[in-house]
Image (tube, helix red, strand yellow):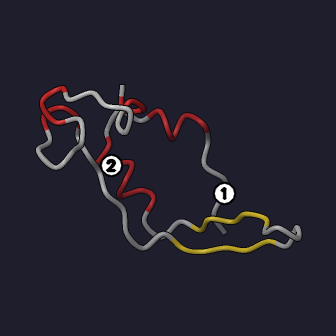
Amino acid sequence: MSKELSREFYLNPDTVAAARALLGKLIVVPDDQGRRVSGMIVETEAYLGTTDRAAHSFGGRRTARNEVSY
């Protein structure tokens, strides 16, 4: 049985390692009536910021959409 991920997990500076570690994890949340619903993570993406051409922040672009990256 898996355990809940710690807050420290989300501070991992290795984006690729964090994305890989999330694969196979189960997400469990309450629905609008308080019942537990869940789903397994089967796909992740890992963007590497300003040097990653696929990232919205590539080249230092800063917009309302990607502000959370900064």
Tell me if mark 1 has few (under 14), some (14-19) or many (20+) residues whose alpha carbon lies within 10 angstroms of its own. few
* Residue in the image at 16% along x and 36% along y: 58
Q: Quadrant of the N terminus?
A: bottom right
Q: Residue at x 42, y 32 (%)?
A: 68
| Image-quadrant location for residue 32 | bottom right
Q: Is residue 42 above or below residue 64?
A: below
Determine the CA span between mark 1 and mark 2. Answer: 18 Å
Q: Is residue 16 left or right of residue 4?
A: left
Q: What residue is pinned by disc 2?
A: 17
- For residue 3, which numbered disc appears in the image? 1
Q: Is residue 47 above or below residue 66?
A: below
- The local secondary structure at tag 1 comes to loop
The amino acid sitting under disc 1 is Lys
- Which residue is rendered at x = 35% and y = 36% of the image? 66
x 37%, y 39%: residue: 65
Q: Earlier in the sequence, mark 1 or mark 2?
A: 1
Describe the element under mark 2 as helix, strand or loop: helix
